[in-house]
Image (spheres, grey):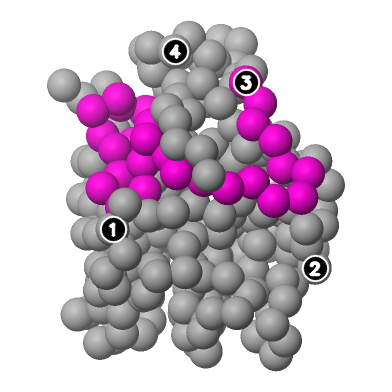
């Protein structure tokens, strides 16, 4: 198990395979009744798992399967699935292909309100699993989703591409803080999982590679051509002090 500041790095998943994943060890392991998970992804794949709480031997807790554009339909958005225990909700959202996408999921068990944020834009709120809690005892897996009928990873949605800037909190972040996370503010770090102090174990052919480019990387200077914190043209994402 390694622990390090991953600020300038990414996890590279070279192929879509059930052998390729990363297990993150949370800094706290008590059950969560509120959470926010944020991460950045770069892929040319269409449908892929972002994360799974627990392992293949765990009781099913929570997982997120994301659908990037283009979709298989003529709709201007894609259906993205979030699973919790034995339930599933589908939330419309649109991501960019061959570009870094910043994704956040927030959930509050007291109200059941679930939100999906993609590149600073939030989808309509939905309700999922009131009075439930998410168990972190078995860790947090990147790049896979547990098959609901068998104790194995679901090969149809194994991730291929790059993952970076993974953070998790034991509370629901307000919109202004999620915008700061999008802009990669160094003073905003997860208190359950922090990319800048990460405990992780690599499996299969996943490797750690330098971050060559990313959108909204703040003072790192790692931008796509023409992008900077000063000229991000997204409503509501202006630099905040």
Q: CA distance from mark 1 to mark 3?
A: 28 Å
Q: Secondary structure at mark 3?
A: strand
How far apart are the two marked residues, 1 and 4, measured between alpha carbons? 29 Å
- Residue under label 3, please give it: 210
Q: Earlier in the sequence, mark 4 or mark 3?
A: 3
For the point 42% across and 28% down, which residue is it?
5
Query: Where's residue 79, x and y in %?
Result: 61, 67
Is any part of residue 161 visible from this angle? yes
Q: Tell me the crowding category of disc 2: few under 14, some 14 to 19, or many 20 or more residues within 10 angstroms, Cα based.
A: some
Residue position for label 4: 220
Q: Foreground residue, 11 or 199? A: 199
User: Distance of mark 1 from mark 2, alpha carbons?
Assistant: 31 Å
Which residues, given as a range, are shown in magenta?
181-210
* Residue 28, label in figure: 1
Q: Earlier in the sequence, mark 2 or mark 3?
A: 2
Residue 88 x, y percent position in the rendering: 53, 82
Q: Secondary structure at mark 1?
A: loop
Q: Nearer the viewer, mark 4 or mark 3?
A: 3
Q: Earlier in the sequence, mark 1 or mark 2?
A: 1
């Amino acid at each position: 198990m390694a622990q390090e500041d991953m600020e300038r790095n990414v996890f590279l998943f070279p192929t879509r395979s059930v052998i390729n994943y990363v297990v993150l060890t949370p800094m706290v392991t008590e059950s969560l009744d509120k959470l926010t998970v944020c991460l950045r992804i770069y892929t040319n794949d269409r449908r892929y798992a972002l994360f799974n709480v627990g392992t293949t031997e765990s009781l099913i807790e929570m997982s997120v399967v994301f659908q990037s554009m283009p979709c298989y339909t003529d709709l201007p958005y894609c259906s993205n699935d979030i699973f919790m225990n034995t339930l599933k909700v589908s939330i419309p959202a649109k991501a960019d292909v061959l570009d870094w996408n910043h994704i956040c999921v927030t959930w509050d068990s007291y109200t059941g309100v679930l939100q999906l944020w993609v590149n600073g834009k939030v989808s309509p709120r939905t309700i999922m699993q009131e009075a439930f809690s998410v168990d972190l005892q078995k860790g947090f897996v990147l790049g896979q989703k547990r098959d609901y009928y068998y104790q194995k990873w679901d090969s149809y949605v194994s991730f291929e591409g790059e993952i970076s800037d993974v953070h998790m909190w034991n509370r629901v972040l307000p919109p202004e803080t999620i915008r700061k996370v999008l802009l990669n503010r160094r003073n905003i770090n997860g208190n359950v999982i922090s990319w800048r102090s990460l405990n992780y174990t690599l499996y299969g052919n996943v490797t750690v590679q330098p971050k060559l480019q990313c959108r909204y990387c703040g003072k790192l200077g790692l931008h796509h051509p023409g992008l900077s914190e000063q000229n991000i043209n997204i409503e509501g994402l202006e630099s905040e002090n």
